[in-house]
Image: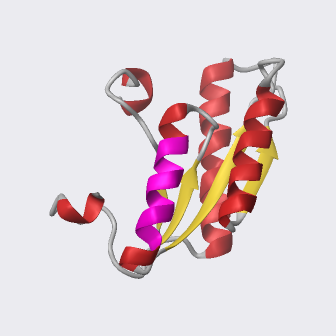
Amino acid sequence: MLKNLNINLVNDHDRLLLAVSGGIDSMVLLHNMNELKSEMNIQIAVAYMDHQKRDDSKLDYELVTSTCKELNIDCFTEKLIDNETENFHDYAHKERYNFFFRIANKISANKIVLAHNLNDNAETV
């Protein structure tokens, strides 16, 4: 767990906003942070943005929202409005982070947590 790493990524009494997409990385993050919340006395909420680029994105929405409901975690969702005049990836990145910051401010979260693995080079860089 994070508290055993001695790098203080998560501290007692943190208010965390988890960016959850419905993919395996973020769902593992959600479940791990849910287990950690009682051990460390932290609060968590979830932010999910639907980019609406895949026909089955509604399945990700349903997975994230139903999991949050089952775990009794507040879940904030938003659909990305398409913008044909900008590069989609740049536009989506900017809008996604604006959404995260807006929700973090709304709930007074002191950290925004994203899940990435070693193959997520583009997002990590």
The answer to if 104 sits in the magenta stretch is: no
Q: Is residue 7 visible?
A: no
For residue 61, side relative to residue 14 (left or right): right
Residue positioned most to the left: 6
Res 75 → quadrant: bottom right
Q: Closest to the observer: 62 or 75?
A: 62
Percent of width and height locating residue 66: 76, 51
Residue occupying the point 19% across, 62% down: 4
Q: Is residue 7 above or below residue 94?
A: below
Percent of width and height locating residue 20: 60, 45
Q: Is residue 11 visible?
A: yes
Q: Is residue 114 above or below residue 57?
A: below
Where is the N terminus found, in terms of image quarters?
bottom left
Residue occupying the point 83% across, 32% down: 58
For residue 106, side relative to residue 93 (left or right): right
Percent of width and height locating residue 41: 43, 81
Res 124 → quadrant: top left
Residue occupying the point 60% across, 26% down: 90
Percent of width and height locating residue 92: 66, 31
Where is the C terminus found, in terms of image quarters?
top left
For residue 43, side relative to residue 82 (left or right): left
Q: Closest to the observer: 86 or 81?
A: 81
Q: Closest to the observer: 44 or 28?
A: 28
Identify the image's colour scheme: rainbow, by chain, secondary structure or one colour.
Answer: secondary structure
- Please tell me whether the stretch drawn in magenta is mainly helix, strand or loop: helix
Magenta segment: 27-37
For residue 64, side relative to residue 123 (left or right): right
